[in-house]
Image (cartoon, rainbow, N blue to C red):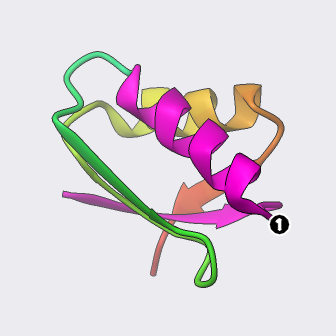
């Protein structure tokens, strides 16, 4: 599992865009995005590819601490 902190999400559309972008990364099996917490949990995929996918949608992503 990979936990990401996502910045810039403000609505349900934002959440869906991030979920879709993450789900489209090769190797991803499951995605859960929490809009209120600005957090994503992803099963599978490469960390750099996950971050790049989120950034391509216009949001900021980094490994959650």
Which residues are drawn in magenta? 1-24
Q: Nearer the viewer, residue 59 or 9?
A: 9
| Residue occupying the point 45% across, 81% down | 65
Residue 7 located within the stretch drawn in magenta: yes
Q: Position of residue 28 (x, y in %)?
A: 24, 31
User: At x 46% / y 26%, what residue is drawn?
Assistant: 49
Say whether residue 57 is visible.
yes
Q: Which residue is mark 1?
A: 10
**Residue 60: percent from left, percent from top:** 75, 52
| Residue 61 position (above or below residue 57) | below
At 78% from the left edge and 63% from the top edge, which residue is drawn? 11
Q: Is residue 15 left or right of residue 64?
A: right
21, above or below 37, in the image: above
Give the quarter of the image for residue 6.
bottom right
Other-residue count near label 1 (Cα within 10 Å), few / some / many at <14 / 14–19 / ≥20: few
The percent coordinates of residue 1 (x first, y second) are 18, 57
* Towards the viewer: 13 or 40: 13
- Left or right of residue 62, residue 41 in this image: left
Number of disc labels = 1
In the picture shown, does residue 17 fall above or below 61?
Answer: above
Query: Quadrant of the rendered structure where residue 30 is?
Result: top left
Q: Residue 18 vs residue 4: left or right?
A: right
Q: Is residue 60 visible?
A: no
Q: Secondary structure at mark 1?
A: loop
């Amino acid at each position: 599992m990979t936990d990401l902190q996502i910045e810039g999400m403000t609505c349900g559309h934002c959440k869906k865009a991030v979920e879709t972008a993450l789900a489209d990364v090769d190797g991803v099996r499951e995605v859960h995005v929490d809009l209120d917490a600005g957090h994503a949990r992803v099963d599978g995929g490469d960390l750099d590819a996950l971050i790049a996918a989120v950034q391509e949608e216009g949001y900021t992503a980094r490994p959650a601490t």
